[in-house]
């Protein structure tokens, strides 16, 4: 490439105005930023690479709320909810082992908003003989508290036995919970960064005020791409974000019939 000059034209000029407003107006650029996050936007659209080892998860980017989920309006405050995910990343649950964490995440996919509504950090007392059964009962309590009957369980290793245990316990308690088995092989740090960074940096990650009473924000402060001393909550939240949500609609809402237009000629 000797003798050639490098031409770099970012999507925004030095004054912050669109370089090609007829193709990428400000509204389209904002949409791209919300979709990919600041790091990818900087690298791909502004041509300014940001090394991943400089990335931090700033708790200050999380927007807190105090509203509970309104099942009749299918909304959190003024925000409509389109789907929900309960995701459990299990472990043995003892104090000195990896954390066992269950996450409840509502979402508004139309506006790309994520609502981290509750996190259950499971700790099994040392005198419990059946730690998996103990945890399944606690997770089932968590589900029933929010009137939910579907859960994603990461079944790598230890979690492989949990779907059957959860099914048996739910039947004994007079309910029926559907379990979706999830297998993750991706690097944990990459999974956390790819899932959380974009909604966090675009202002679309919300958390209920009760989350401030959990270790979650401390995990964010201590996390780097090389990992953190404790990141089990982050990993579970990443799993919830990346999972396909269960669609939701207001209670009592009627499904509108759809009539196809057959007034055409072949």
Image (cartoon, grey):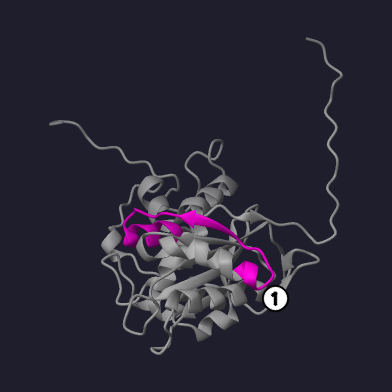
| Position of residue 106 measured from the top left corner of the image (x, y, whole percent) | 62, 64
Left or right: 247, with 35 as reference point: right
Report the residue at 51% width, 67% height from top.
165
| Position of residue 20 measured from the top left corner of the image (x, y, whole percent) | 50, 38
| Position of residue 33 measured from the top left corner of the image (x, y, whole percent) | 49, 53
Element type at marker 1? loop
* Image quadrant in which you'd find residue 265: top right
> Which residue is outermost to the top?
266
Left or right: 244, with 197 as reference point: right
Work out whether residue 55 can be spotted.
Answer: yes
Question: Which residue position is annotated with label 1?
Answer: 68
Work out whether residue 111 can be spotted.
Answer: no
Magenta span contains residue 193: yes
- Viewer-side residue, 182 vs 81: 182
Q: Is residue 88 above or below residue 18?
A: below
Magenta span contains residue 203: no
- Viewer-side residue, 176 vs 202: 176
* Image quadrant in which you'd find residue 128: bottom left
Q: Exactly how many numbered labels are in the figure?
A: 1
Report the residue at 50% width, 45% height from top.
18
Crowd rating for badge 1 (residues with CA inside 10 Å; few <14, some 14–19, many 20+): few
Quadrant, the N terminus: top left
- Viewer-side residue, 260 vs 166: 166
Quadrant, the C terminus: top right
* Image quadrant in which you'd find residue 94: bottom left
> Which residue is outermost to the left?
2
Please give the range of residues in magenta: 170-195
Report the residue at 51% width, 48% height from top.
32
| Position of residue 113 measured from the top left corner of the image (x, y, whole percent) | 60, 60
């Amino acid at each position: 490439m000797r003798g050639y000059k490098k031409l770099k034209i970012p999507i925004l000029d030095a004054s912050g105005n669109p370089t090609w407003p007829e193709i990428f107006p400000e509204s389209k650029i904002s949409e791209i930023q919300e979709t990919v996050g600041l790091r990818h936007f900087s690298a791909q659209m502004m041509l300014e690479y940001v090394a991943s080892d400089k990335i931090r998860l700033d708790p200050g980017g999380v927007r807190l709320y105090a509203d509970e989920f309104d099942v009749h309006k299918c909304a959190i405050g003024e925000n409509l909810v389109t789907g929900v995910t309960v995701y459990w990343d299990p472990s043995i649950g003892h104090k000195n082992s990896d954390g066992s964490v269950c996450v409840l995440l509502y979402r508004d996919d139309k506006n790309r908003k994520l609502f981290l509504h509750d996190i259950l950090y499971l700790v099994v007392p040392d005198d419990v003989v059946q730690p998996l059964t103990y945890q399944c009962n606690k997770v089932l309590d968590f589900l029933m508290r929010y009137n939910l009957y579907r859960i994603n369980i990461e079944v790598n290793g230890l979690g492989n036995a949990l779907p059957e245990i959860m099914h048996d316990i739910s039947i004994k308690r007079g309910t029926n919970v559907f379990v979706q088995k999830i297998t993750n092989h991706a690097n944990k740090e990459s999974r956390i960064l790819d899932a959380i960074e974009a909604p966090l940096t675009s202002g679309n990650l919300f958390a209920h005020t009760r989350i401030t009473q959990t270790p979650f924000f401390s995990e964010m402060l201590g996390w780097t791409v090389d990992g953190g001393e404790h990141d089990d909550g982050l990993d579970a939240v990443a799993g919830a974000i990346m999972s396909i949500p269960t669609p939701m609609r207001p209670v009592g809402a009627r499904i509108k019939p759809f009539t196809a237009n057959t007034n055409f000629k072949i």
